[in-house]
């Protein structure tokens, strides 16, 4: 009996526990259902319908949007920003330049809607308890969101592009600066670093600045890419290839002026690969207006005065420097008489009307020309890629043959050009001496470590012999007149023998003749 009572008691306790557990389970389900219902309602109202309201005490750009829908908030914020747009002032700086953009410089655009939507979701993207916590925080402390004025400024890209073009710069390679009149003939221009505007950062900085103020100042962010240069390597990439000078110590002041003036036109000249240069075009017309003066020139084998006399010494000096630098000479001509300041076949006669010195840079590097002059000599230096170690270039003149002259021609002074000197037959006046001529060749020789390794013939010239000219008076003397014996001796045709040929060659080794050789 006792056991039966205990079993009934246990059964009643179990029934009570079962009923209590069922009640608690129902209570939990009910609470969960309520939370789910509220969450669904919030989700439906705030997300699906797009008609979510802003929490109490919410501001955008200082404007209270509490309880407003997204569309309502967008309208009031946009209206306020458009009213303040013309008060905007954006100062962009880079180094020592400043550009100012004003609000009324921009077109109007509306890009605030996505931002307003994003703000409206604040405190509504978490779970139920997180949302409740943020809602309580906003209602208690308030929340002021900011929308940048960039969201109402149209044509921003085009406005900034104009400024960016002025700031950005392309890279300029380092280069040599040719300064022929300085002690250091070459210096190095380090070129120019590339400068690129960091556009993304610039937009971000403008956007952030216009969230907090209507008047902003921004240093334009740039990326500078430095040139990588080896200064020593650049300096060593060029050197003196040749130098040549001639003497004009005994020349007149006017002749020296002409020689120097012509050479000065080449001082500092840079000749690029493949470029051709004309002496006549570079120096210009030899006129008084261009600063040239009257001095001796050779016309038909005779020295006469002419404007620009002496310019051929300038062209000859340049010519010899060019061939010693192994530069291609496209056009060159010899004088009718050998020049006294260079060997045979190494003169360069120029005339504005029919003769020119033309050369071409046949290398893959620039050539730099420096000229110099003092009271005794003029010279030319050619710079470019250095010759190889131990390499040397020389010139050699070879007299092939002496061309004998035909002696004097006696010419009657029919026009009376020399009437102040001679009048009667038997009176003589020498105009010029006869001169022998020469067949000659010019060679360029190549040496390596003092040994001749090659040569080439560059000239084969004929300096034609010149007749002497003696003028004689044309009037018959009176029977009673006695004509004094003239001191002018008529020179017979030249005969070249082994003995005098050796003497002529020996003299030519020292200097080309400038006077008659008997």
Image: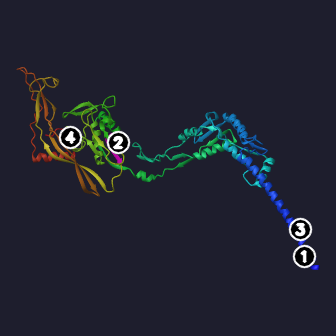
Magenta span: 369-383
Most extreme residue toward the left is 479
Q: Is residue 180 above or below residue 9?
A: above
The residue indicated by pointer 4 is: 338
Q: Earlier in the sequence, mark 1 or mark 4?
A: 1
Does the magenta segment cover residue 455?
no
Mark count: 4
In the depicted view, which residue is nearer to us: 56 or 158? Answer: 56
Direction from residue 318 to residue 233 in the image, left or right:
right
Direction from residue 108 to residue 493 in the image, left or right:
left
Q: Residue 279's image quarter?
A: top left
Q: Is residue 308 above or below residue 164?
A: above
Q: Position of residue 180 (x, y in %)?
A: 39, 43
Q: Position of residue 494 (x, y in %)?
A: 10, 40
Depth check, mark 1 against mark 4: the one in front is 1
Does the magenta segment cover residue 379?
yes
**Residue at (63%, 33%) from the top-left corner?**
104
- Judge whether residue 50 can be spotted in this image: yes
């Amino acid at each position: 009996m006792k056991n039966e009572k205990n079993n009934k008691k246990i059964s009643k306790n179990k029934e009570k526990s079962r009923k209590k557990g069922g009640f608690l389970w129902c209570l939990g389900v009910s609470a969960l259902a309520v939370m789910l219902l509220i969450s669904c309602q919030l989700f439906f109202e705030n997300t699906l319908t797009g008609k979510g309201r802003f929490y109490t005490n919410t501001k955008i750009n200082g404007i209270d949007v509490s309880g407003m829908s997204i569309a309502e908030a967008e309208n009031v914020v946009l209206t306020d920003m458009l009213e303040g747009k013309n008060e905007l002032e954006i100062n962009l700086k880079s180094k020592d330049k400043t550009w100012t953009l004003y609000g009324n410089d921009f077109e109007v655009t509306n890009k605030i809607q996505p931002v307003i939507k994003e703000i409206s979701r604040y405190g509504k993207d978490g779970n139920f308890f997180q949302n409740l916590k943020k809602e309580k925080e906003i209602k208690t402390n308030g929340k002021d969101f900011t929308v940048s004025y960039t969201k109402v400024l149209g044509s921003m890209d085009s406005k900034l592009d104009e400024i960016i073009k002025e700031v950005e710069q392309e890279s300029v390679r380092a280069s040599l600066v040719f300064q022929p009149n300085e002690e250091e003939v070459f210096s190095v221009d380090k070129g120019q670093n590339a400068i690129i505007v960091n556009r993304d950062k610039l937009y971000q900085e403008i956007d952030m600045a216009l969230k907090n103020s209507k008047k902003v100042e921004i240093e334009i962010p740039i990326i500078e890419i430095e040139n990588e240069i080896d200064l020593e390597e650049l300096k060593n990439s060029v050197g003196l290839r040749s130098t040549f000078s001639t003497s004009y110590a005994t020349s007149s002041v006017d002749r020296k002026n002409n020689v120097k003036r012509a050479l000065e036109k080449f001082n500092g000249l840079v000749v690029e690969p493949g470029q051709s240069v004309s002496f006549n075009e570079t120096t210009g017309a030899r006129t008084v207006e261009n600063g040239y003066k009257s001095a001796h020139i050779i016309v038909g084998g005779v020295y006469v005065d002419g404007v620009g006399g002496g310019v051929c010494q300038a062209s000859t000096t340049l010519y010899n420097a060019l061939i010693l630098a192994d530069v291609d000479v496209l056009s060159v001509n010899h004088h009718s008489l050998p020049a006294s300041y260079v060997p045979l076949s190494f003169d360069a006669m120029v005339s504005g009307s029919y003769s020119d010195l033309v050369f071409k840079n046949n290398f893959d590097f620039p050539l730099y020309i420096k000229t110099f002059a003092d009271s005794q000599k003029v010279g030319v230096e050619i710079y470019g890629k250095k010759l190889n170690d131990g390499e040397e270039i020389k010139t050699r003149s070879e007299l092939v043959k002496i061309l004998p002259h035909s002696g004097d021609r006696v010419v009657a002074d029919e026009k009376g050009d020399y009437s102040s000197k001679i009048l009667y037959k038997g009176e003589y006046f020498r105009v010029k001496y006869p001169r022998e001529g020469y067949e000659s060749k010019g060679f360029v020789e190549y040496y390596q470590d003092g040994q001749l390794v090659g040569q080439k013939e560059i000239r084969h010239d004929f300096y034609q012999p010149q007749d002497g000219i003696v003028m004689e008076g044309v009037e018959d003397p009176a029977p009673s007149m006695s004509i004094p014996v003239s001191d002018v001796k008529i020179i017979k045709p030249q005969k070249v023998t082994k003995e005098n040929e050796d003497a002529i060659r020996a003299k030519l080794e020292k200097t080309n003749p400038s006077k008659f050789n008997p």
